[in-house]
């Protein structure tokens, strides 16, 4: 457990404003929030907890002056900047409901959320966001009335965050502020999180103070960190993981949030800050592993051999801990020496030498990536959950983990498997239902309170959950066999040349795949073999690369059953991402988008005589 701080009430009765009041009173001088004023700024600007509460109080008065009322939704599209974080808290203190929209959302998704949420006010970052939001002000079907812009120079005649804050400073009355937040009840909505829309329109998930405060308290019990530890906040606040890790848990722990406005700059922030905790979705850990492998490939053979020997010791130690066994003294001593002399100096260059808690969630983690990091003494505590469950349902922890699993249920949460393997869950952290356009909530649970998660999995004899795939994403071949695409994709991605993969075969007699060449490792692999190429396209066409990819598919197929094997594939060179639409903002694969985009290629694979194209 990270913290033994006093709770301002019984766990099921705590509200977020009560935690902020406690932090300001008891930890007022501790750092709460830090950020860089601009991309070229070397230093950090920091607010203490007492300063945060004063600013939140002023902002609450500013939003009240705009006419924001209790229970009203307010939309926000900003990066991880102080205006976003502080506004979120200020709106909650008014009894309003902050709703963050992904910055990569398409105009039609924004229009859907604006229409569905019935919000009258949206707070956006600058000119880029205004291009997508301004047309909604003239849309008769959208209730949106006002835009507030964080970047004053780009406001274009709209209200600015600065003017809102100044107005709040003039109008603020301490008594009104205290009265407003004390009227908040645990069953009141704390936020609405719209799902990222992998299969259709985003759904509004209404989560209460009780849902999220219990989630924070119960998750905290699985983590052992120094009190008030820093958290690097870089995932979007529209993502339930970052809302929990970057807002709600820091309020519970009175810890220090470091805002990283550009997710691409997170590795630089890690190098600078040497954090003790780090969370990354599977794609983040995959990219970090690819970067490390690319560096290792260029080291002298003797140095690589020493590192590999240290990796073997770390993995052997992790295996004992995984089985719940005491690590043999000789192995512990050898590992300690290798860690000090080999691993830590290299990890220190990346800022990863102080890590005590590392975690991942949102999608099945490739086991080769988990094993890779275990070789560096970094045990990624994979977890599983959904927006609808306030985040985590199951979690691995240092006192009980299985690499490749997603752990065991957190306190107070029940799991059971339906006949088809779908995971059902119920408990106080499970949401009450999806938001309807009229503001009411539609329950998604059955009469006994069980919520069908849409994920397929299995429970082992020790109670650890192992994910198979999303129920809607399972491939059913023409002969009626069920195939988990994630299993096949993660198996073929174990080869370093393959960075991304999509497997297709629904209603077909066999599977085909789109494989994406890893943009970081492929050039290193080629250079080590004396292959000089001018572009990724030329590299993908090189006979040696094509032969290696063929071997990678053959190796993967040898580990899969006949129905799961890839019969034909196409090698691509353009990496998929949120900007081009193939990934969600939380870096999950949008299968339908990829299938639509590459439909002709996929169809062609069922017409070609050979394994590759």
Image (spheres, helix red, strand yellow):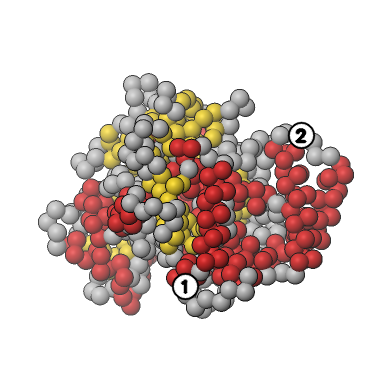
Residue located 59% across and 64% down the image: 291
- Mark 2 or 1 closer to N-term? 2
Residue located 57% across and 38% down the image: 405
Which residue in the rendered view is the most extreme toward the front?
609
Tell me the residue that label 1 is attached to. Answer: 538
The image quadrant where one finds the N terminus is: top right
- The numbered dot on residue 398 is none
Q: Nearer the viewer, mark 2 or mark 1?
A: 1
Residue 531 position within the rendered picture, expressed as x and y whole percent measured from the top left = 58, 73
Q: Quick one: SS at disc 1?
A: helix
Q: Left of 131 or right of it: where is 20?
A: right
Residue 127 position within the rendered picture, expressed as x and y whole percent measured from the top left = 30, 72
Q: Is residue 231 visible?
A: no
Q: Is residue 412 above or below residue 498?
A: above
Q: Quadrant of residue 481?
A: top left
| Residue toward you, 33 or 141 | 141
Q: Is residue 276 above or below residue 475?
A: below
Residue located 60% across and 51% down the image: 369
Count neighbours of disc 1 (C-alpha within 10 A) and say few if under 14, some if 14 to 19, many if 20 or more: few
Tell me the residue that label 2 is attached to. Answer: 325
Q: Left of 86 or right of it: where is 32?
A: right
Residue 601 position within the rendered picture, expressed as x and y whole percent measured from the top left = 33, 57
């Amino acid at each position: 457990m990270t913290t033994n701080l006093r709770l301002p009430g019984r766990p099921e009765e705590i509200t977020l404003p009560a935690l902020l009041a406690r932090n300001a009173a008891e930890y007022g001088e501790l750092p709460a929030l830090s950020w860089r004023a601009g991309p070229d700024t070397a230093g950090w600007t920091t607010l203490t907890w007492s300063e945060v509460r004063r600013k939140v109080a002023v902002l609450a008065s500013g939003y009240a002056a705009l006419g924001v009322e209790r229970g009203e939704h307010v939309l926000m599209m900003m990066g991880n900047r102080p205006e976003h974080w502080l506004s979120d808290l200020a709106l909650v203190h008014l009894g309003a409901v902050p709703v963050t929209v992904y910055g990569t959302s398409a105009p039609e998704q924004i229009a859907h959320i604006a229409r569905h949420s019935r919000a009258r006010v949206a707070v956006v970052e600058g000119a880029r966001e205004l291009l997508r939001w301004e047309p909604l002000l003239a849309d008769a079907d959208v209730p949106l009335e006002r835009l507030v812009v964080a970047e004053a120079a780009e406001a274009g005649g709209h209200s600015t965050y600065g003017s809102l804050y100044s107005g709040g400073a003039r109008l603020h009355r301490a008594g009104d502020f205290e009265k407003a937040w004390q009227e908040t009840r645990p069953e009141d909505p704390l936020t609405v999180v719209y799902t990222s829309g992998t299969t259709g329109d985003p759904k509004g998930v209404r989560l209460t103070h009780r849902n999220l405060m219990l989630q924070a308290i119960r998750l905290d019990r699985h983590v052992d960190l120094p009190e008030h530890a820093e958290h690097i906040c870089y995932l979007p606040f529209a993502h339930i993981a970052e809302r929990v890790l970057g807002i709600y848990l820091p309020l519970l722990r009175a810890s220090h949030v470091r805002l990283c406005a550009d997710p691409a700059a997170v590795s630089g922030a890690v190098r600078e800050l040497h954090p003790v905790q780090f969370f990354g979705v599977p794609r983040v850990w995959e990219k970090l592993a690819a970067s490390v492998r690319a560096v290792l490939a260029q080291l002298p053979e003797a140095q690589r051999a020493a590192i590999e020997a240290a990796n073997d010791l770390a993995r052997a130690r992790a295996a004992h801990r995984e089985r719940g066994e005491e690590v043999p003294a000789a192995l512990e001593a050898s590992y300690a020496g290798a860690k000090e002399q080999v691993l830590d100096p290299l990890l220190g260059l990346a800022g990863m030498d102080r890590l005590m808690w590392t975690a991942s969630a949102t999608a099945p983690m490739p086991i080769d990536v988990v094993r890779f990091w275990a070789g560096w003494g970094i045990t990624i505590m994979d977890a599983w959950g959904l927006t609808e469950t306030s985040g985590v349902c199951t979690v691995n922890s240092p006192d009980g983990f299985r690499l490749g699993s997603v752990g065991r249920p957190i306190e107070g949460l029940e799991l059971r498997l339906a006949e088809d393997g779908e995971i059902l869950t119920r408990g106080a952290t499970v949401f009450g239902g999806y938001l309807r356009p009229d503001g009411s909530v539609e329950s998604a649970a059955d009469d006994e309170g069980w919520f069908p998660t849409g994920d397929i999995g299995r429970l082992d004899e020790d109670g650890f959950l192992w994910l198979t795939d999303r129920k809607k994403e399972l491939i059913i071949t023409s002969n009626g066999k069920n195939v988990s695409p994630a299993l096949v994709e993660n198996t073929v991605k174990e080869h370093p040349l393959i960075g991304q993969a999509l497997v297709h075969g629904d209603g077909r007699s066999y599977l085909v795949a789109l494989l994406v060449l890893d943009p970081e490792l492929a050039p290193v692999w080629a250079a080590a073999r004396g292959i000089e190429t001018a572009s990724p396209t030329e590299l993908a066409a090189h006979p040696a690369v094509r032969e290696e990819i063929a071997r990678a598919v053959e190796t993967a197929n040898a580990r899969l059953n006949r129905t799961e094997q890839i019969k034909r594939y196409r090698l691509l060179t353009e990496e998929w991402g949120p900007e081009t639409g193939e990934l969600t903002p939380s870096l999950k694969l949008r299968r339908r988008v990829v299938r639509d985009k590459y439909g002709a290629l996929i169809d062609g694979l069922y017409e070609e005589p050979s394994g590759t194209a």
